[in-house]
Amino acid sequence: MDLGLPLILELAALGIGTGFLAGLLGIGGGMIMVPFLTLILTARGVAPDLTVKMAIATSMATIIFTSVSSVRAHHKRGAVRWDIVRRLAPGIVIGSLVGSLGVFAVIKGSLLAIFFGLFVGFSATQMFLDKKPKPTRQLPGTAGTVAAGGVIGFISGLVGAGGGFISVPFMTWCNVAIHSAVATSAALGFPIAVTNVAGYIASGLRVENLPPASFGYIWLPGLVVIALCSVFTAPLGARAAHALPVARLKRIFASILYLLAAYMLYKGLTA
């Protein structure tokens, strides 16, 4: 695959956009990256069953960098709930390893695309409806938070996202303020990404017909260009998140997810 100027510009634009959205919405950027990376890899002749898997793995790898950049900006504003991060992290690591080392390696790319589309569409609907939690509802105890972290890590590993599309609704449902939920989700993106990337590398090392410059399922040129660009715009998104009203933030989140869910459903159903 020729890494010419047009491809570099495409990846740079994707990195700039996803970095901003990672900071704005606390989603790690993966929900945006996976559809566009799938499109880019497909256009360059990568086998259909590998495009979705490589897009998911590469997207997750970039989240390692965008998460650090985004969470620093949120932390300066005192918005990150580190107590919640500590409670969810153990389950996240377990769920991520089960997803990236086990299920991800054996499931077909077309099924991953369909699962991605359906789950993102569901998440967008939950945000759009904006159901108000009971005033007395709080985060669950230790067993509940480990289980919740496991679900977040597992599903994130299957769709290549930082978990914000699950963790933000979950935390707001438990009466965590939306801006704190977004900031905390950005912090959770780091353990999700590191654990899943290790799984993608291990499960992809023996796969045949991967394009040049691949490390397991991770496409290194995409990782490098997107990460370099996204780390600069993630703090800008984080700054904007604290200036937007809650209702508008939720509608932006949901609208973007609907569009990307539709594309990935089309991709999976026509594979």
Image (spheres, rainbow, N blue to C red):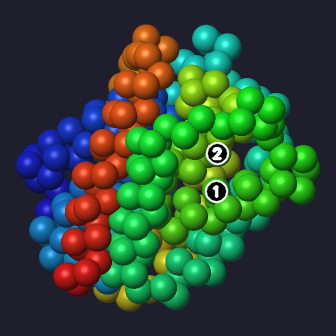
Quadrant the N terminus occupies: bottom left
Where disc 1 sits, the SS reads helix
Provide the residue designation for mark 2.
170
Mark 2 touches mark 1? (CB < 8 Å): yes
Counting from the top left corner in percent of width and height, residue 164 is at 54, 44
Q: Which of marks 2 and 1 is in front?
A: 2
Badge 1 density bin: few <14, some 14–19, many ≥20, Cα 10 Å: many
Is residue 134 in view?
A: yes
Quadrant hosting residue 52: bottom left
Is 150 or 212 nearer to us in this picture? 150
C-alpha separation, residue under disc 2 versus residue under disc 1: 10 Å
Residue visible at 71% across and 36% down in the picture: 134
Where disc 2 sits, the SS reads helix
Residue visible at 52% across and 88% down in the picture: 106
Counting from the top left corner in percent of width and height, residue 14 is at 25, 43
Would you place residue 231 above or below residue 254 in this image? above
256 sits to left or right of 3: right
Quadrant the C terminus occupies: bottom left
Is residue 59 in view?
A: no
Residue 22's disc number: none
Counting from the top left corner in percent of width and height, residue 213 is at 34, 66
Is 149 or 140 nearer to us in this picture? 140
Is 216 or 144 nearer to us in this picture? 144
Q: Please name the amino acid that badge 1 sits on.
A: Ile
11 sits to left or right of 210: left
Counting from the top left corner in percent of width and height, residue 214 is at 38, 68
Provide the residue designation for mark 1.
152
Residue visible at 14% across and 52% down in the picture: 7
147 sits to left or right of 172: right
Quadrant hosting residue 46: bottom left
Q: Please name the amino acid that badge 2 sits on.
A: Phe
